[in-house]
Amino acid sequence: MTTEKSLIDSALRGWKSNIEQADKLFGGLSPEQLEQEVAPGKNRLIYLWGHLAAVNDRLLPLLAIGERLHPEFDGMFISNPDKSVQLTVSGQTLKAAWQEINQKLWEGMAKFSAGDWAQRHTAVSEQDFEREPHRNRFAVLLGRSAHVAYHVGQAALAERKI
Amino acid sequence: MTTEKSLIDSALRGWKSNIEQADKLFGGLSPEQLEQEVAPGKNRLIYLWGHLAAVNDRLLPLLAIGERLHPEFDGMFISNPDKSVQLTVSGQTLKAAWQEINQKLWEGMAKFSAGDWAQRHTAVSEQDFEREPHRNRFAVLLGRSAHVAYHVGQAALAERKI
């Protein structure tokens, strides 16, 4: 394996490991458990899960893998705080969407060469990218990996009361 | 910049950004604030900070950068849960140690070439590494970046009551 490939392999394994941790934490919860807050007055588990799904969904166009699958998640899980908007998605629907999003992302990511990863992401212009070559797809992958870990850490605090 | 260098640059920026988030969260807290739990009955902020410092300190030998600076942190912050052992470190001492550890790590990391990052870390044998080349230093960097993000997410939940 070349050095480039080895570096990318490590990053993809890291991504997968964070997603699997989220799967484990959220995937087996009942509708009642998903309603629990991670700490008193803080976000509910269903909100964190939906938030991760929505942010990952946005990666599809950002990495130029494809169109978004669930743009309707943004209103519920990104642009508004928890409990301010009625959720129109159940735990079961969210689980299916989460898997669908991560599956499509994974298939797209697996096709990228090292050169592809070093290319600009779609939210940076060609001109800006010339000055700031670190705004590439690989940085997005690492940033979003950390984003998953950040909220998984919070979700792990929720008491399993029910 | 070569593709290899660009990938590593992204990972180092990601590391730094996570460390800086931790700096911001913990660095300005009073001794009383550091005693607060991130959620009722959960770890105190000082424990999470010490835990991150201890785990990062372990990176020094793991990445073959150098000897550990604070092996005495393990008993307080890794091998025992919070509140089970008397802490013999103050917030101020911890802050100095945290900065010292991250500074030494950063200087070591900055010297690694792409080939260095793809080398095995010191906890994997040469034989095992031949079969499992993904157990390299780069994977350790990404894994520990996620580890920082995981606990920073938790620390961000603590109410600033005092």
Image (spheres, coloured by chain):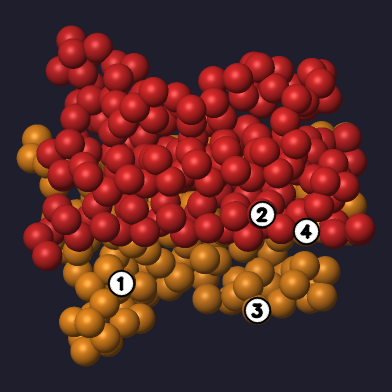
Chain colours: A red, B orange
Mark nearer the N terminus (3 vs 4): 4
Q: CA distance from mark 2 to mark 4?
A: 25 Å
**Which residue, given by chain and number where applicable, does mark 1 sit on?**
B135
Same-chain status of marks 1 and 3 = yes
Between circles 1 and 3, the one closer to the viewer is: 1
Q: Where, quadrant-wise, is the C terminus of chain B in this rendering?
A: top right
- What amino acid type is highlighted by mark number 3? Ser
In front here: B47 or B130? Answer: B130
**Which residue, given by chain and number where applicable, does mark 2 sit on?**
A27
Label 1 packing within 10 angstroms: few (<14), some (14-19), many (20+): many
Q: Which mark is residue B79?
A: 3
Label 1 secondary element = loop
Label 2 packing within 10 angstroms: few (<14), some (14-19), many (20+): some
Q: Where, quadrant-wise, is the N terminus of chain B in this rendering?
A: top left
Which image quarter: residue B9? top left
Point 27% across, 68% down: residue? B134
Point 39% across, 23% down: residue? A67
Mark nearer the N terminus (4 vs 1): 4
Label 3 packing within 10 angstroms: few (<14), some (14-19), many (20+): few
Point 60% across, 19% down: residue? A72
Q: Are marks 2 and 1 in contact (CB under 8 Å)?
A: no
Q: CA distance from mark 1 to mark 3?
A: 24 Å
Label 1 resides on the chain identified as B
Q: Which mark is residue B43?
A: 4
Measured as percent of width and height from the top left, residue B142 is found at 38, 55
Label 2 secondary element = helix
Which image quarter: residue A111? top left
Between circles 4 and 1, the one closer to the viewer is: 1
Q: Are marks 3 and 4 in contact (CB under 8 Å)?
A: no
Between circles 3 and 2, the one closer to the viewer is: 2
- What amino acid type is highlighted by mark number 1? Arg
Same-chain status of marks 3 and 2 = no
